[in-house]
Image (spheres, rainbow, N blue to C red):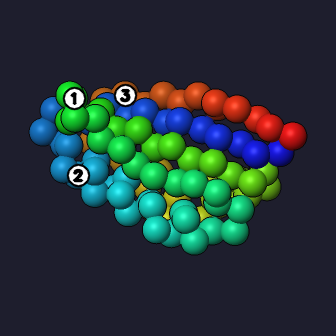
Amino acid sequence: MTITKRVTFIAKEGSEAKMKELLSAMVLPSKAEDGCIFYEIFQYEGNRRKFMAYESWRDEAALDSHKASAHYAVYKSSYEPYCEKKYSDELEVLG
């Protein structure tokens, strides 16, 4: 079952560059993970404080493995001081 998620981050005023750095550091190691189908970070042109992570995983086990990775732990322990708001949606689950 494929899992696709969209996670939106709103950086605190003045923290846009640091937020972009932290989120961008996730792209290459995430793409290298077994089970990663797609993983990209986007920054909105009309609102430079707003970022979106768009990710797709082969199945729940691949997503769980991603959440247990070292690079995910670094992101998880580092982003909050720079983030005003974070929310996510699971876009689709396909069998």
The quadrant of the image that shows the C terminus is top right
Residue contact at pointers 1 and 2, CB within 8 angstroms: no
The local crowd at label 1, few if under 14, some if 14 to 19, many if 20 or more residues have their Cα within 10 Å, is: few
Q: Is residue 83 visible?
A: no
Q: Amino acid at mark 2?
A: Lys
Q: Which residue is mark 1?
A: 47
Mark closer to the observer (1, 3): 1
The quadrant of the image that shows the N terminus is top right
The local crowd at label 2, few if under 14, some if 14 to 19, many if 20 or more residues have their Cα within 10 Å, is: some
Q: Which image quarter: residue 86?
A: top left
Please say if 35 is above or below 12: below
Mark 1 to mark 3: distance in Å? 14 Å
Closer to the N terminus: mark 1 or mark 2?
2
Residue 22 falls left or right of residue 57: left
Q: Amino acid at mark 1?
A: Asn
Secondary structure type for disc 3: strand
Q: Which residue is mark 3?
A: 85
Q: Is residue 22 visible?
A: yes
Residue 7 falls left or right of residue 67: left
- Percent of width and height locating residue 18: 23, 52
Closer to the N terminus: mark 3 or mark 2?
2
Q: Amino acid at mark 3?
A: Lys
Secondary structure type for disc 2: helix
Please say if 95 is above or below 35: above
- Percent of width and height locating residue 45: 22, 35
- Residue at x 64% of width, y 57% of height: 37
Q: Which residue is mark 2?
A: 18
Mark 1 to mark 2: distance in Å? 15 Å
Residue contact at pointers 1 and 3, CB within 8 angstroms: no
Q: Which image quarter: residue 22?
A: bottom left
Please say if 50 is above or below 58: above
Secondary structure type for disc 1: loop
